[in-house]
Image: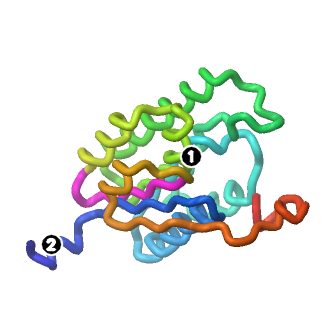
Amino acid sequence: MDKQNASNDGIVIVYTGNGKGKTTASLGVALRAIGHGLKVCMVQFIKGEWHYGELNSLKKLEPDFELIVAGKGFIGIIDDDHPFEEHVKAAKTALDIVEQKISLDIFDIIILDEINYALHLGLLQLSDVMKVIQYRPKRLSLILTGNYACEEIILSADLVTEMKEIKHPYKQGLKAKRGIDF
């Protein structure tokens, strides 16, 4: 393989594990990419109905960064009042959006935020996600975040990082902090 041409090829990155920082790591890559004049799109598969700091700060990166919040929120927590079928529909819509954004061929990186968790919960079929990975344009990089990355996703990736929880303030009874957790 010609190394010069290979440097123009996109890669598949997976950020997974039970520790914090998966979405944050993908946003770090986005900041770096935008600094080099690249265009980034993030589609969120789970997050949806809570307001969190990224929604404000990412608007400042437009038009080089596009954020699409497609999820219905975290599933099975106290304020989740959506039937499971609504979560499934939202995840499928999010994957359709990813496919549309890929077909536009204007983005250099597309972040599929919390897609691993959506797969783990049965909101999506693995075969559909694998098609997106396999048939993406060669120049496009994909970043898949979320806990529970399955073996097939890990094997298809070029870079996999597992965030491991060592200590977490929630376990000490501390509530989520604005600017840190949301």
Count of number-bearing discs? 2
Q: How is the image coloured?
A: rainbow
Q: Amino acid at mark 1?
A: Gln
Q: Earlier in the sequence, mark 2 or mark 1?
A: 2
Q: Position of residue 92 (x, y in %)?
A: 48, 30
* Residue located 15% across and 72% down the image: 5
The N terminus, quarter of image: bottom left
In which quadrant of the rendered image does the C terminus lie? bottom right
Residue visible at 41% across and 65% down in the picture: 160
Q: Residue 43's spot in the image, x, y percent?
A: 52, 47
Query: Percent from the top left, x then y, of residue 162?
Result: 51, 66
Marks 2 and 1 close (CB-CB < 8 Å): no
Q: Which picture quadrant has residue 85?
A: top right
Left or right: 23 as drawn, with respect to 74:
left
Which residue appears at 57% of the width and 62% of the height?
A: 22
What residue did someone put label 2 on?
5
In percent of width and height, residue 104 lies at: 33, 44
Q: Which residues are magenta?
A: 137-146
Residue 71 is covered by the magenta coloring: no
| Whole-number angstrom distance, CA of label 2 to CA of label 1 | 31 Å
Residue flagged by tag 2: what amino acid is it? Asn
The image quarter containing residue 121 is: top right
Viewer-nearest residue: 129 or 104: 129
Instruction: Determine whether, in the image, residue 10 is placed left or right of residue 72.
Output: left
Q: Identify the image quadrant of residue 70.
A: top right
Asked if residue 20 lies left or right of residue 103, the reply is right
Q: Is residue 141 magenta?
A: yes
Q: Which residue is mark 1?
A: 44
**Foreground: 28 or 173?**
173
Q: Is residue 127 above or below residue 162?
A: above
